[in-house]
């Protein structure tokens, strides 16, 4: 693929993720300036923390990717083809060679300051009907020099940013989502459909039943100020139904994938359970400040990115952020009803990737 084709394919891939008003260039310009600031902040952290900043490269890739996204959005609103604002390069291989090489004049700090100046010039433009082509070309040139300075290939930036923004903003196609256990025997698969009865007894403890059998231990909130966390298994059920992942639920119903010892240990074992439990507890600590997501139609990008970092190395890492958002919001919608009624029936369906609430029938 040529360098020009790479940029063309990138703009096509991310165009439908652009949800900003098409007639509002100021928000795009401010977004571009903010992302360049993010690049500089990442460099500053590297100066301050040195080798301790282990996320440096990943953070740089993300910030440069978001900057490219805003640059493409700005070109789109200016009626320009992004390929026309970047310096001409013959092939991807040529650009990769440049990106991986060294350049005595391209010290990171100097290159980033030049990128910042170019961003500042763009920010001073009043309207996009002014001659913006040359300032955009200057910015694109400084952008490539900055990439050269930090030794990150443009192909890497394009690939990671496409995966990030499409996974965050676009509804995933059901046929492309992972199941994780479809190749395993039925007794090692999460149930395709489940109904879990949750009740709270006079002791204040919550109990769960599946197929009229009690599963798990009775739970309390385990905190001085009661907050309803005794019903947190709802979150595991949401992950199981929507993400098709929950080592905790697998353990509760004894349907681990033991026919594959490696999967059993790495994906269904104790560490994976701790990761899921820790993740559920951390999200809950944030949710309490947000009224348990009551009335929320989305989850913050920062929270979702932390979730993705939390599960890195586990199979659920393959699930797009948009699906995580659905699992969190739908799970909390059911949790709020269970909490309000001190119990209920949680219905999960993996085929439709849904979780719903039903009241317990009166006896």
Image (cartoon, rainbow, N blue to C red):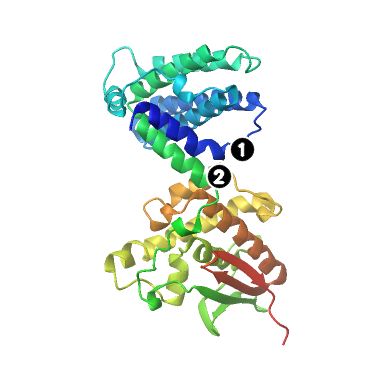
Q: Is residue 226 visible?
A: no
- Left or right: 141 in relation to 340: left
Cα distance in 3D space between marks 2 and 1:
9 Å
Which mark, residue 19?
1
Q: How many marks?
A: 2
For label 1, the crowd category at 10 Å Cα-Cα, with few meaning under 14, some 14 to 19 and many 20 or more, is: few
The correct choice, above or below, for 194 with respect to 54 in the image is below
Closest to the observer, 110 or 167: 167
The correct choice, above or below, for 228 with respect to 38 in the image is below
Closest to the observer, 324 or 207: 324
Asked if labels 1 and 2 touch by Cβ distance under 8 angstroms, the answer is yes
| Residue hosting label 2 | 169
Q: Which of the 4 quarters of the picture holds residue 190?
A: bottom left
Give the residue displayed 61% in from the left and 56% down from the top: 329
Q: In which quadrant will I find the N terminus?
A: top left
Q: In which quadrant will I find the C terminus?
A: bottom right
Q: Earlier in the sequence, mark 2 or mark 1?
A: 1
SS type, badge 2? helix
Give the residue displayed 50% in from the left and 41% down from the top: 165
Q: What x and y, as percent, mark residue 66?
A: 49, 32
Q: What x and y, as percent, mark residue 334?
A: 64, 65
Closest to the observer, 82 or 205: 82
Give the residue displayed 56% in from the left and 27% down from the top: 76
Q: Which of the 4 quarters of the picture holds residue 26?
A: top right
SS type, badge 1? loop
The correct choice, above or below, for 99 with respect to 103 in the image is below
Q: What x and y, as percent, mark residue 153?
A: 34, 29
- Left or right: 30 in relation to 321: right
Q: Which of the 4 quarters of the picture holds residue 281?
A: bottom right
Closest to the observer, 333 or 52: 333
Give the residue displayed 51% in from the left and 62% down from the top: 239
């Amino acid at each position: 693929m040529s360098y020009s084709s790479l940029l063309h394919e990138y703009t096509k891939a991310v165009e439908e993720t652009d949800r900003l008003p098409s007639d509002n260039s100021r928000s795009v310009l401010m977004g571009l300036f903010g992302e360049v600031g993010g690049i500089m902040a990442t460099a500053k952290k590297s100066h301050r923390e040195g080798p301790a900043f282990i996320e440096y490269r990943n953070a740089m890739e993300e910030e440069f990717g978001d900057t490219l996204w805003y640059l493409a959005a700005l070109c789109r609103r200016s009626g320009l083809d992004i390929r026309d604002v970047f310096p001409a390069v013959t092939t991807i291989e040529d650009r990769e060679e440049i990106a991986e090489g060294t350049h005595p004049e391209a010290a990171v700090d100097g290159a980033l300051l030049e990128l910042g100046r170019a961003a500042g010039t763009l920010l001073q433009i009043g309207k996009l009907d002014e001659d913006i082509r040359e300032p955009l070309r200057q910015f694109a040139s400084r952008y490539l020099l900055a990439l050269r300075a930090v030794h990150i290939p443009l192909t890497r930036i394009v690939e990671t940013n496409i995966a990030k923004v499409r996974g965050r903003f676009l509804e995933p196609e059901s046929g492309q989502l992972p199941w994780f256990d479809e190749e395993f025997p039925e007794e090692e698969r999460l149930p395709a459909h489940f109904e879990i009865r949750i009740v709270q007894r006079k002791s204040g403890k919550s109990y769960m039943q599946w197929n009229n059998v009690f599963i798990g231990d009775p739970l309390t909130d385990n905190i001085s100020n009661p907050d309803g966390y005794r019903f947190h298994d709802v979150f595991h059920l949401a992950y199981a139904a929507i993400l098709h992942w929950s080592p905790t639920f697998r353990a509760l119903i004894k349907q681990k994938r033991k026919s594959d010892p490696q999967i059993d240990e790495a994906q269904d074992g104790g560490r994976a359970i701790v990761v899921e439990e820790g993740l559920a507890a951390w999200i809950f600590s944030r949710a309490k400040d947000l009224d348990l997501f009551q009335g929320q139609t989305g989850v913050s990008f920062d929270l979702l990115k932390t979730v993705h970092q939390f599960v890195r190395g586990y199979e659920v890492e393959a699930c797009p952020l948009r699906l995580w958002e659905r699992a969190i919001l739908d799970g909390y919608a059911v949790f709020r009803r269970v909490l309000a009624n001190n119990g209920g029936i949680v219905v999960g369906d993996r085929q439709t990737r849904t979780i719903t609430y039903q009241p317990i029938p009166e006896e």
